[in-house]
């Protein structure tokens, strides 16, 4: 990232706290979400909130048209089929994933991440998959193994395609986890001194080199995504990449910090429909 681009991104940060006052103070998750939407719609009144499920494509009709053409014949259908076969293959106990997940694993992905009171922490959809595996005699998958956890999660998300995101933050412990995730989202980090909000709030819709920056609202509805064809990437892998791009040491995937960040970040997309297994550049 060159100095010109850095200066461009930093230029608007002074007003970030003012522009999103409710999201930087103690507010309810719904108040935060509404404040984000208010900010984006004020800045881009011609972009529908529902279109934020398409990320930066919401700001670029030509790119959206290209995306629609690609999604007619997705180049990653073979990977989704691998995930389906994994989903339907019995575990060592003889049970399948559908036997140990709520509602047979259908229409549940939009509830994750969720705060598990018994465990006292946020659990992700990948955590739920691994819990199912371990309970049925299998080893847990590595979170960053795209040939196993990646393709299985990509298929499982298709079972919730169209479900409205429904992240619940209830009780003091859940709220503490949410606030921790919010703090990570707004905290500057790394040698470049950027926060997640630096790009995806203050500079959403702005071009960085040849690419438009996407808004935080709508982000969480479509991961994992297939980037550039069949390169599968999870949301926490993307977090990892963002930390490294601002020259910061990323927390471990699946850590409390990463899970809490995903918890806060996902709640911003509440009410928007899931878009499973999508293409991104």
Image (spheres, rainbow, N blue to C red):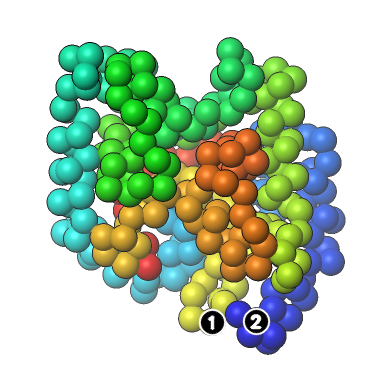
Tally the numbered discs.
Answer: 2
Q: Quadrant of the C terminus?
A: bottom left
Whether residue 48 appears in this view of the structure is: no
Residue 150 occupies which quadrant of the picture?
A: top left
Residue of label 1: 209
Q: Nearer the viewer, residue 227 or 164?
A: 227
Q: Secondary structure at mark 1?
A: loop
Q: Position of residue 173 (x, y in %)?
A: 71, 21
* Residue 10 against residue 90 in the figure, above or below: below
Residue of label 2: 5
Residue drawn at point x = 71 percent, y = 47 percent = 184
Horizontal placement of 25 versus 281: left or right? right
Horizontal placement of 118 versus 161: left or right? right
Whether residue 240 appears in this view of the structure is: yes
Residue drawn at point x = 47 percent, y = 40 percent = 272
**CB of mark 2 within 8 Å of CB of mark 1?**
yes
Q: Quadrant of the N terminus?
A: bottom right
Horizontal placement of 10 versus 130: left or right? right
Residue drawn at point x = 36 percent, y = 74 percent = 62
Q: Position of residue 102 (x, y in %)?
A: 36, 17
Q: Secondary structure at mark 2?
A: helix
């Amino acid at each position: 990232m060159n100095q010109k681009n850095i200066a461009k991104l930093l230029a608007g940060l002074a007003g970030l706290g003012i522009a999103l006052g409710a999201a930087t103070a103690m507010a309810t998750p719904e108040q935060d979400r509404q404040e984000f939407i208010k900010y984006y719609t004020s800045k881009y009144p011609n972009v529908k909130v529902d279109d934020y499920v398409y990320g930066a494509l919401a700001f670029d009709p030509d790119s959206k048209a290209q995306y629609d053409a690609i999604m007619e014949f997705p180049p990653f259908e073979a990977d989704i089929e691998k995930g389906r076969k994994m989903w339907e293959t019995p575990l060592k106990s003889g049970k399948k994933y559908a036997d140990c997940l709520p509602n047979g694993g259908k229409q549940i992905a939009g509830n994750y991440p969720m705060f598990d009171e018994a465990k006292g922490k946020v659990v992700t959809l990948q955590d739920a998959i691994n819990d199912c595996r371990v309970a049925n005699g299998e080893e847990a998958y590595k979170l960053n193994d795209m040939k196993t956890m990646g393709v299985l999660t990509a298929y499982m998300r298709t079972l919730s395609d169209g479900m409205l995101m429904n992240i619940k933050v209830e009780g003091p412990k859940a709220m503490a986890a949410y606030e921790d995730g919010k703090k990570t989202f707004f905290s500057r980090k790394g040698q470049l001194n950027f926060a997640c909000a630096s790009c995806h709030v203050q500079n959403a819709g702005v071009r960085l080199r040849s690419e438009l920056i996407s808004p935080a609202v709508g982000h969480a509805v479509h991961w994992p995504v297939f980037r550039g064809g069949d390169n599968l990437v999870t949301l926490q892998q993307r977090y990892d990449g963002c930390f490294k791009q601002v020259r910061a040491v990323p927390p471990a995937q699946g850590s409390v910090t990463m899970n809490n960040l995903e918890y806060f970040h996902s709640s911003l997309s509440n009410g928007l429909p899931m878009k499973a297994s999508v293409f991104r550049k």
